[in-house]
Amino acid sequence: MPLQGFDVLILAGGKSRRMGIDKAGIVLGGKTLLEHTLDKAVNWGGNRILVAGPPRNWVEAEYIPDPPQHQPCSLRGLYGGLLASSSPWTLVAGCDMPFIKSEVISHLWALKNSGGAVAWWRNRRQPFPGFYPRQGLQIVAAMLEENRFHLAALLDRLQPAVARNISLVDPEGISFFNINTPEELDLAEALGR
């Protein structure tokens, strides 16, 4: 995919409560989850690839710190990424999403409106992978100040385009599979992708 007007942000700074260890460093098929996502991101067409969260000495990347004044959460990482991005758009994905298809990224990019673009999968909007506008910074900052951390509330405020036909490019929905538990890691290993 040729370079587009967006940066890529990989969220890798969460607490990993359900997994119990740093998910970014979990090995799947000989590579860490963060390495899988970084490898995929190279093909998505972004200008820069940013990683929100603490630097890891086992993989080189452009790490950006989470803003210190808020508790660790996806919204805080997204805020830091929008601040660090030099593009009008930021494609956001989790480091625990090793199977994102480039076709899904292209589909969302083509569909976006002024509030961005996300996919509809399993009867709900999936915040990741998704495109977020830099102009949404004020909304994210306000939500953090209000201690409102739910991404569904962010989507309510931004009103992004919703790709309800995402199964045309990802019939299995594998792009939305994320690894939060040991059982999901076992399933990812069984998928063997």
Image (cartoon, helix red, strand yellow):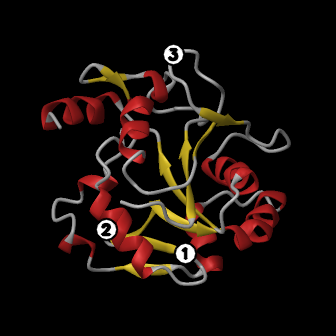
Determine which quarter of the picture holds residue 56: top right
- Residue 95 in the figure: left or right of residue 132: left
* Image location (x, y in percent) of residue 22: 51, 24
* Image location (x, y in percent) of residue 114: 60, 83
| Image quadrant occupied by the N terminus | bottom left
Q: Tally the numbered discs.
A: 3
Question: From what the image shows, is residue 172 above or below residue 23?
Answer: below
Instruction: Say what amino acid the circle numbered 3 marks.
Output: Trp
Q: Please report whichever mark, 1 or 3, sits nearer to the chain's N-terminal start.
A: 3
Disc 2: which residue: 121
Determine which quarter of the picture holds residue 141: bottom right
Disc 3: which residue: 58
Disc 1: which residue: 116
* Image location (x, y in percent) of residue 19: 44, 28
Element at badge 3? loop
Q: Please report whichever mark, 1 or 2, sits nearer to the chain's N-terminal start.
A: 1
Q: Nearer the viewer, residue 129 or 23?
A: 129
Q: Nearer the viewer, residue 50 or 145?
A: 50
> Label 1 neighbourhood size at 10 Å, few (<14), some (14-19), many (20+)?
many
